[in-house]
Image (spheres, rainbow, N blue to C red):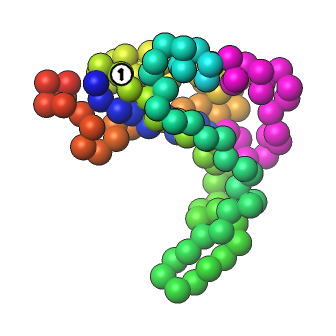
Amino acid sequence: MAQYAILIFDNAEAGDYTPEQQAASQRHADDLVDSGAMIAAYALRSADTATSLRGDVITDGPFIDSKEVIAGVCVIEAPDLDAALDLARRNPAVQWGRGGVEVRPVAGSIPPSAR
């Protein structure tokens, strides 16, 4: 099985998830765990808590200014990209219209037969 990172994006100005959105996100995570696909998952604090480094310069805030920020990341196992996309498509962030997800293979995890 190959591993894929799912980067979860959200609108930087949308504010925190509502309790209903938090519950939907938790149900999706629980489904991934129950299916055996979930390797790890982390929700990130808001982008204004970020500290960025460029060479010797340290600044408060995200690395770049953007209307969308990475709100969380999870790593899953799936037989191929199509299966990973199917799991990612079920993420509530895709349905809410305020963000979305990006799926990337984890370097070195894809067996030659799945490429």
25 sits to left or right of 2: right
- Looking at the rendered image, the quarter that the C terminus falls into is top left
Position of residue 85 relative to residue 67, above or below, is above
Q: How many marks?
A: 1
What residue is at 13 percent from the left and 31 percent from the top?
112
The image shows residue 60 at horizontal and vertical percentages of 71, 72
Q: Specify whether residue 85 is painted magenta.
A: no
The image shows residue 101 at horizontal and vertical percentages of 54, 32
Residue 68 visible in the current orientation: no
Question: Most extreme residue toward the bottom, as rendered?
Answer: 56
What residue is at 40 percent from the left and 22 percent from the top?
84
What residue is at 45 percent from the left and 21 percent from the top?
37
Residue 57 visible in the current orientation: yes
| Rendering quarter of residue 108 | top left
| Front residue (pair 110, 100) | 110
Position of residue 53 relative to residue 2, above or below, is below
71 sits to left or right of 17: left
| Front residue (pair 108, 92) | 108
| Front residue (pair 51, 40) | 40
| Rendering quarter of residue 30 | top right
The image shows residue 97 at horizontal and vertical percentages of 68, 26
Amino acid beneath label 1: Ala
| Rendering quarter of residue 42 | top right
Question: Most extreme residue toward the left, as rendered?
Answer: 112
The image shows residue 44 at horizontal and vertical percentages of 67, 47
Segment tinted magenta in the rendering: 10-27
Q: Disc 1 designates what residue?
A: 78
